[in-house]
Image (cartoon, helix red, strand yellow):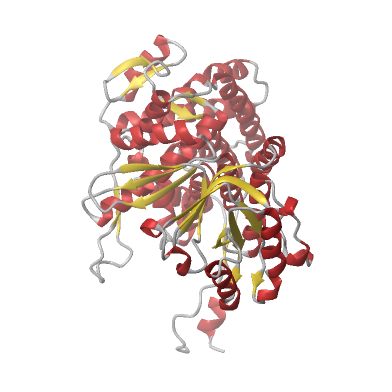
Amino acid sequence: MSRTQKIWQVPKVVFQPQVYAGIQAGINQIVNAVAPTLGPYPRVVLYDPTLGLTGKPPEILDDGGVIARRIIGISDRDADVGAMLVRHMLWRQHEDVGDGAATTAVLFKTLYDEGVRYVTAGGNPMRLRFYLEQGLRVILNELGTMTAFVEGKEALTHLAETICYDAQMARYLGEIFDIIGAYGRLELRNSQSRETEREYVEGMYWDGGVLSRNMLLNAPGLRVEMENPVLLLTDHEIEDPYDLVPVLALLLRMEVDNLVIVARKLSEAVLGLIHLNQQQQKIKAQIIAVKSPGLGLEEQVNSLMDLAVLTGGRPFMKATGEKLTHVQPEDLGQARRVWANKDYVGIIGGKGNPRALRQHIAELRRAYARATDPKEREALQQRIGVLMGGAATLWVGGITESEQKFKKELARRTAEALRGAIREGVVPGGGVALLNCRAVLKERLAQAQEPEEHAAYHILLRALEAPTRTLLYNVGIEAGAVLADIEAAGRGYGFDVRTRRIVNMAEAGILDAASVTRAVVNNAIRTAAMALTMDVIVHRSNPPQSTATE
């Protein structure tokens, strides 16, 4: 083994003060890329993943979380530690609540810069961390006193516009969430025109469609509709025609007019049996077979259980070994109407027990509140939305592919924030909620005993101004005088950068989702407090760049 190779196998260990200097350099690079996107007149970031080699247009980004996510590393290894720390924090903010990444970034940077200044002057980083996290609890409690709940199309539209700054999109999203609520299904699709439009679907629906297009041959517009059908729910792949005979016999006894079979798959032989019986009019009921909702096994099982509660049926599950030979009339679900085409299936007016449905939705909401994984939360939210009925599609238009992609991501981010606002309320926007928290921190500062406690509250007071300072800087306004005017105006007042006046933020409709603001301070303060205790960086060894020997 060469001497050069041996040297590369030794990890690099970095100590103070180089650790703080390196981490700060990385933080500055990420935050400086994100901070310009804060406010109603954001500057955008162009991201070219291909270095222009493929001719594809660059992405237009104004979401701090997505911007940070696109930065996968920087060349300075010490700085890269700080950069990746911020990157992870901002993406977590983006994943959890959909908005607030830029605010988190500028808040975090001020906390870390002020904290480093204190620690390098001789302060104790662990005691400082303790009091910063104690201050976080004070801020969260104060935000709780400001929280108000929002409802109605007009209020939701105002809130949407403070997030997306697109009047038409805000109007449509305000209308949509006034109808579908916090958990309703919203699909974002590319429009075939430049205009953004919306569309509503009554009841619940899912991707899948009929299992055989032959079932649509005589249907107007290749869409079949059934009134008052019964539903057989199963995750079986029905291969043997004899497995379906008991079901067909049951139909004859029940004298029902319509049957919907919800299954994973039907063999050609089974489909042929259904077609033959209906052709020979042995069974008068119209029968269609549709694909069961969900992609993976777990998702299909959960969806069938939800359908069972909605329609009052009992699912026949492969995992339990239940066979269709045991089906009874009470096992079949019922609905007011079912429709299906080659791509989708919809159920309107499930006739399950209303009390059981309310209890099931309540259980899913509790599970949603407990869930921490973004994918799990999204799946639970979709299940709740399906059961509550009502869905919407926002067709996002744009002149170019880049603009369309940009607006689609903007709509997604706004929708997530609106969901959080409906569930958990709103606080004054424009950074004012954070400014309002300074009064209670000043009271704590006056009672502080330890030097680190005194320093922590000073740092928090400075940091809570940072989002407002950045917002004003982004529109070319000197922050000092404006902050003094805001404080003089009183609690709840802030600076509307669009009208350039001091206004009551709630009355002006300038609001932030409380869930977003709480996540901002929680992520920024906890991450900064932890980062201040980092004393040593250990870099993994790099692979040898050359095999030359000395």
In the rendered view, tell whether residue 170 sits above or below residue 286.
Answer: above
Residue 237, by quadrant, is bottom right
Question: Is residue 34 among what the camera can see?
Answer: no
In the rendered view, tell whether residue 125 sits above or below residue 260.
Answer: above
In the rendered view, tell whether residue 350 sits above or below residue 427.
Answer: below
Image spot of residue 363 (x, y percent): 70, 40
How many labels sit on residues? 0
In this rendering, position of residue 138 left or right of residue 41: right
Out of 462 and 496, give the one closest to the viewer: 496
Question: Is residue 440 among what the camera can see?
Answer: yes
Residue at 39%, 32% in the rendered image:
175
Image spot of residue 152 (x, y percent): 45, 24
In this rendering, position of residue 36 left or right of residue 72: left
Out of 297 and 532, give the one closest to the viewer: 297
In the rendered view, tell whether residue 484 sits above or below residue 106.
Answer: above
Image spot of residue 428 (x, y percent): 46, 22
Residue at 51%, 43% in the rendered image:
203
